[in-house]
Every structure is written in C-alpha cells, then in structure tokens.
Image (tube, grey):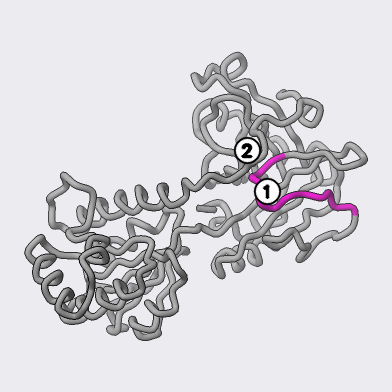
Amino acid sequence: MHDWLNALTPPRPAVLVTVAAIQGSSPRETGACMAVGADFQHDTIGGGHLELRAAEIARDMLAQAPQLPAAQRRLLRFPLGPSLGQCCGGVVHLAFERIDVDHLASLRQRLRQRRDSWRLVALDQPTAPTVCDADGVPLWGPADGLPEFDPRLPCRVIADTHGHRWLLHPLRAPRAHLYLFGAGHVGAAIVRALGELPCQVSWADERDDQFPPHLPANVRIETAAPQALIDAAAPGANFLVLTHSHALDQALAERILRRGDAGWFGLIGSKTKRMQFEHRLRERGITAERLAGMVCPIGVPGIHGKEPAVIAAAVAAQLLQVWEAQAATPIDHAPATPPSSILTAAAP
C-alpha cells in the first residue's frame, strides 16, 4: 500500500525517497517509498542503516534553500555491505525528491478509483513531475520532452535521448479485491486487519448502522444489494461471506458458486455448517466441483481461537497466501539491474 501518499497533507514539506533500482539482494523492492519531513517519517524503504542514512539526507535537503538543485532531487548509490554494514549485500539506488504535497490528492483519488498512475520525474532537471495514466498518457504536468517508456514494466531509471535520467515511478492500485459481506464483530475485525494490506475491500451489509464511523483508506462501503454486487464483480474477484443470517449466507453462497469464475470464496462457519450447506446447495443444482471451491471453515489451518481478532488474523494470513498465488503469474519484466551508465551518482 502507499501509506506515505495517504499520510502526506499540506502544508508539510517533505522529501520522497524511492527505491529506484536494485542490484543483488535488497531490503525492499523497486518502487518502495518513504516520505520524510523535518519532524515525521511515513512508510519504509526497509529499515536499518540504509533508512537512517536516507532520512538524514532527506532532512538535509529540506534544510537547504528550496531553489538549490541539491535541495530538489538526487539519485544516490548505496552498497549495503561495504558502506552501511547491512547483511543484504546488494546495491540500492535511491531517488530523493522534494515533493509538492498539494498535487498528491489527485493521485490518492485515482488509487481510490482503482486507477493506476505513473510519475515521471526528471532527475537531472528542475521541471515538475508528470503524472500519466496506466497507458502512459500524460494527465497533468509537463507533456513535452517526456521519454518513451513501457508502462507494463516496474519502477526504474532510464535515460532519454539527451542522456538525462528519469525516474519512472508507478503507483498501481492493489489488484487484490475482496467483497466482504457482513459488518458484525468478525467482519469489522477483518476490515481492521486488512486496513494496511495491499488490497481493496468492498464491504456490504444491509444494516447501515453496523458500519464504524471511520474506515481504512482501502475500504469502501457498498450500498447496492449484495446479490447485485456479486453479479457485477469482475471475473476473478474474491468473496467472503459472514453475515448475521444463515439463510442470507446460503443465498449469497449459491449466487457466488453459480458464477463459476470467483478467484476465492470463503464462508464463515464450522465443518457442520459446511456439510449442511453442501447438502442444500447440491439439491439446488450446485455441482460437487463448484462446492469444492468453497472455503469453509475459513482461516489458515492450526489457528482455533474464535475471538474476532483471532479469526481476522487467520483470515488475513489466508488471503495474503491467496493473493500472492494469484499475483504469481509470470510477467515479462525488464532486467532488475540497470545499465551502470544511467546510475552514476555516488552516495555521500
């Protein structure tokens, strides 16, 4: 998740530190960010000495006059073993960028709408960043002189035809999407557990007074009828049913299983409830193959506590396993190690 983006609000000057490229082992992946202000820090690039040094550099930039080039942007190379004493042993290239907090609201809005964005940052020039859509079409910021790039590839640094370096920084909305039916104690606990995880949650319950007044940024309350939500969900969507009514649970389970294209479907309940539901659903024409895809009981095996927070922890771990497996489809990415001619700056 983009915690730094949700945390930054005007008028708080900040430097955004981005893992621009890695060589060998590193604490975080490319694209990982942290925002550093004079008296705050949001998110992480992996902790340890690297993060401490990066925060010091960022605050040194903030202490300088904003118009100075060194106070605006830097691209620095950090050998983790020789210079920082970290056991990862690889090399991390960090981009430091003094950011305008005012324009971040539009990026937050696009993420809430599940729209991907790209930030194109000129590392060797003082021009403002350009924000592009998922296809690389500029949305705002300078539209001239931009480098060509493939928006299917991960965060990286490239050089344009003039030799100028650019940070290509994707802000992708989480692909994992859970439709959660039920706002009781367990549902609320699961929402809290998923609140800082890389997912989007559509939360539905016919009892409007059951929802808490404050929601995590990745959770949206749905007002449509549950059956309509199930029908409108995209292929591969994930569903979790734990309403206050066994009859409603059964109706929603049947609706989900008739689709035949759910990514994952969990139903709260015991083994006895599963047996009862299987019997009733078979009578209504649901095949054994479809029923085999219904996860009930829910949660990773070996956790038996029935407290809402315990169930939520077990279900969150199970969903992370599911989502990582779903995301493991091979994608043809560019090499992780960038050309040395592009990344020439040295750490201070």
User: Residue at horizontal 65%, vertical 61%?
Assistant: 104
Residue 6, picture quadrant: bottom right
Q: Residue furthest left?
A: 272
Identify the secondary structure beneath mark 2: strand
Q: Is residue 42 found left or right of 154 in the rendered image?
A: left
Location of residue 154 with respect to 110 vertically, above or below: above
Could you tell me residue 130's position as x and y percent? 78, 57
Q: Residue furthest right?
A: 162
Q: Identify the residue position indicated by label 1 in the image.
A: 169
**Dot placed on the residue nearer the N-terminal end, 2 or 1:** 2
**The magenta segment:** 145-156
- The amino acid pointed to by label 1 is His
Numbered tag placed on residue 19 in the rendering: 2
Q: Is residue 13 magenta?
A: no
**Image side of residue 264 versus residue 60, left or right:** left
Residue 247, horizontal then vertical, whole percent: 16, 81
The residue located at (9%, 71%) in the rendering is: 276
User: Is residue 146 part of the magenta span, yes or no?
Assistant: yes
Q: Note whether 291 is above or below 126 in the view shown.
A: below
Q: Residues within 10 Å of mark 1 (few under 14, many from 20)?
A: many
Query: Camera-side residue: 33 or 200?
Result: 200
